[in-house]
Each structure stands twice: as structure tokens, then as C-alpha cells.
Amino acid sequence: MTLETVKGAILGLVTGDALGVPVEFIDRDKLEKSPVTDMQAYGTHHQPAETWSDDSSMALCLLESLISGIDYADMMARFLRWAKEGYMTAHDKTFGMGRTTLKALGKFAHHTPPLECGGTGTYDNGNGSLMRILPVALYLHSIIGQEFPQSPEAYQIIHNASALTHAHPISLIACGIYCAAANELLCGRNTSADIQNGIAAAKAFYRSSSEWSTFLDQFRRVEVDVLQSLTRNEISSSGYVLHTLEAALWCLLHHNDYRSCLLEAVNLGKDTDTVGAVAGGLAGIQYSFHGIPADWLDVIAKRMEIELLCQVFAQSL
Ligand SMILES: [Mg+2]
């Protein structure tokens, strides 16, 4: 995998997160009166314009951990450092952590094995694992190969990386579908039919076992033709993992460049930074690193450190 691809994915995610941070929790009707049109400062979290949040911090922790291969305890140890010390943050300050993640990290701090820390309840299906899972797709695309969405082993790794904090089947399946869609883009296959092929590959895996298939009905809107037919009013941008997956794919399918895709994502309101991060990772791969507006990239906090991390990761593959 080229460094350009890794940078497109990771800085696409970070930039989408930073675009959404100032308007997190703001309702859509308010944003319709005063939409986000550019990278802006302050707002909800009173942060400067270049600030990214938990979504990027956790994705960067995962990216860094994967440089040495799969080690779930190491992933959790990095997340814990982020939570406790502000490690891998924009301004050395942790913010934006979700409830399920906080609970899981508390268990890990008290010596629960990493794969037993994640919440398994219906209410543990916030988007906290989906928002950080993209580095796993990059890793699997390189290590297992372009056909990883056909590999049960790949899903095991995706599920484990999610289950560190979010272990309910709906969160696991959302991460699996997202990684399979990302793989299409990583293969340079960018059409809506290609994205559908990625979704279908993941669904075929989940349909093959009753452990998963009972949950698939909830993903019935995660189909390219359905998403293309849905209006903006039918898309929710709450923090529920399924809503975030639908919203991110909907934005990707309704736009033809990174900037307009991401402005759409954050102007949906509510969980703006995470919809921005989840859509931004995919759009960053589709339109490449060079498709991310330079004036947005230029202000991203610790951009050089992030690019260096991408470089070490790309070299490790
Ligand atoms: Mg956030």
C-alpha cells in the first residue's frame, strides 16, 4: 500500500473529525440556517480550528499499534494512555470520550483481559468503534490481501478490534461492512456498484452464520440502491452506530468530491465529528490525499506527526 493511500485514509478521517468538532451536538435545522462552509474554530468544544477529537485519537492509537502487528492488549494500553494522559491528542487534552469506551477502559485498567472489556448490551451500540476501525481495513488489505472480505479470519480481527470497547453484534457487523466497503476503494474500485459489492461481500459472510444473520435485518437500509433513494430527511446522524454507517455511506454516494461530501456530513448535525470522520476516511481514499482541500489540511493540528506515523505504518506493511 502506498503512503499516499494511507495518508488519504487517515488524514481524510482526521480532517472530517476536525470539520465536525465545532458543531457537535447541534441540530440539523439550526445548521440549515447557519451551515458549516469551511474549517472553523471554537463552537461546541471551544477549540481552535485545527482540533480533532476522540475519533482521530483512537484511530491513530490503533494505527500506531498495528505497526507491530495485531496485539489487542497493546491497542487497549494506547487507548488508556489517551484517556489518562492525553496521548495522541491534538492539544495534549483528551475530549469527546463516549460512555461505553470509558467503561471498557475502566475494566482494562482493572486487569480485565482486553477482549472481555467491551460492552455487549443493546445500548452499547454507539459509534465508538466504527469511528476508529479504518486502520484495521488498511492493515487487512495489505496483510491478508484484496480479498479479505471473503476471509473469516479478517472478520475475527475486525470484530476483536471493535470488541475492545464495543462488543455487541450490531457494532461488530457495522465495522465489518465498513471495512469491506473501504476495501473496494482501496482496490481503486470507486463506483456505486463497487461499494455495493463490498457491502454484499460482508453481508454474505454474516448471512452464513446464525450468530450474525439474526441481526442483518437491521442493516436492510445499508444497500447502495436503498441509500441512493433515501432523502436527507430520512438519514439520521445520531451517535447510534447503524445511523452513522448509513449517514457516512449516504454522503459518499451523494457527492463527487471530498469537500462537498464532508460539508454534507457535518451539516447533518448531531454527531457531526464522527459522521465526518467515518465519511472522511472513505472519501479520503476515494478522492486520494490530494483530494482533501489543502486549506483544511494546512491547519490540522500535529499534521506532520500524523504524516510521519502514516509513513512508518506504510513501511511496516
Ligand atoms: Mg469525537
Image (tube, helix red, strand yellow):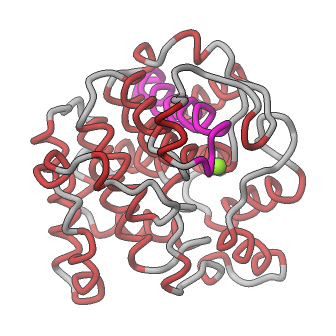
State yes or no: residue 4 in magenta.
Answer: yes
Query: As drawn, is 109 to the left or to the right of 128?
Result: right
Residue name at image x 67 percent, y 68 percent? 101
Looking at the image, residue 177 lies above or below residue 172: above
The residue lying at 57 percent from left, 29 percent from top is 15
Magenta-highlighted residues: 1-26
Q: Nearer the viewer, residue 148 or 50?
A: 50
24 relative to 191 in the view: left or right: right
State the image coordinates of residue 240 (x, y, percent, origin top left): 47, 66
Q: Nearer the viewer, residue 256 or 84?
A: 256
- By secondary structure, the bulk of the magenta-drawn segment is best described as helix
Residue at x 47% of width, y 80% of height: 168
Q: Compared with residue 39, is residue 272 higher up or lower down, i.e. above or below?
A: below
Q: Quadrant of residue 207?
A: bottom left
Dividing the picture into quadrants, the one containing residue 309 is top right
Q: Quadrant of the N terminus?
A: top left
Image x and y of residue 275, in percent = 48, 47
